[in-house]
Amino acid sequence: MITAAKELIKRVVKEVVIDEKFMEMALKEAKRAASDGEVPIGAVLIKGGDVIARDHNRCMQLNDPTAHAEILVIREGGRVLGNYRLPETTLYVTVEPCPMCVGAITQGRIGRLVYGAPEDKMGAVSSKFRLLNDPGLHHRLEVNGGILKRECSEIIQGFFRGRR
């Protein structure tokens, strides 16, 4: 029993280390967005430990209100993998996704979502809306929130503080 518990702890610690590594990549993308004057949200899509796509919000740059980081990496992931379904992928995003992005995540059949900071105004996972808990939803996925929460919160809050 103790051996099983130790193995579980090792597995969980390993998962947290991996999650933090990819969230750091997403944070770098968020910083790129901020330097471009975009809302600083970054995302990374992985499969089997390999980065498939990484990007940041580019709504103003592309004159496209749907050019959220999540949407951009899902689009690129589909292109790279040659499929509009992205099972067995993990999406890392610095801020809890909005309703539009949650829709894209479910349509793409993303296997796991990991996000950093909660989003009280438009968060569609656990803060404002709980779209993934809807019993009529056709796709279920694993969700882990709060990875590098402080760092993710600081970059988004700092951006909006600077605009006020």
Image (tube, helix red, strand yellow):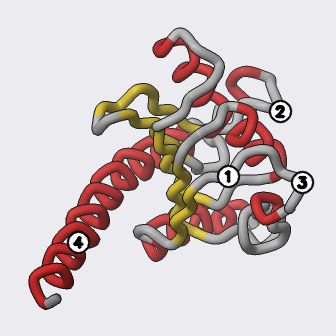
Where the C terminus falls, by quadrant? Answer: bottom right
Label ID, residue 65: 2
Counting from the top left corner in percent of width and height, residue 101 is at 74, 43
Mark 4: amino acid: Val
Labelled pair 1, 3 in contact (Cβ < 8 Å): no
Picture layout, residue 81 above or below residue 91 = above
**In this rendering, which labeled residue sits more in front, label 4 or label 1?**
1
Residue 136 is tagged as: 3
- Furthest toward the right, the residue is 136
Say which residue label 1 marks.
140
CA–CA distance in space, label 2 to label 3: 27 Å
* Label 2 neighbour load within 10 Å: few <14, some 14-19, many 20+: few
Question: Between disc 4 and disc 3, whose residue precedes?
Answer: 4
Seen as rendered, the residue at the extreme left is 3
Dot 1 amino acid type: Arg
Eye-nearest disc, 4 or 2: 4
Mark 4 — residue? 13
Report, in whole angstroms, how far the alpha carbon at label 4 lies from the one at label 1: 24 Å
In x, y percent, where is residue 157? 61, 69
**Secondary-structure class at tag 2:** loop
The tag on residue 26 is none
Residue located at (52% from left, 23% from top): 77
Q: Nearer the viewer, mark 2 or mark 3?
A: 3
Earlier sequence position, callout 2 versus callout 3:
2
Q: Earlier in the sequence, mark 4 or mark 1?
A: 4
Please state which amino acid type lies under the numbered disc 3: Gly
Q: Marks 4/2: CA distance?
A: 38 Å
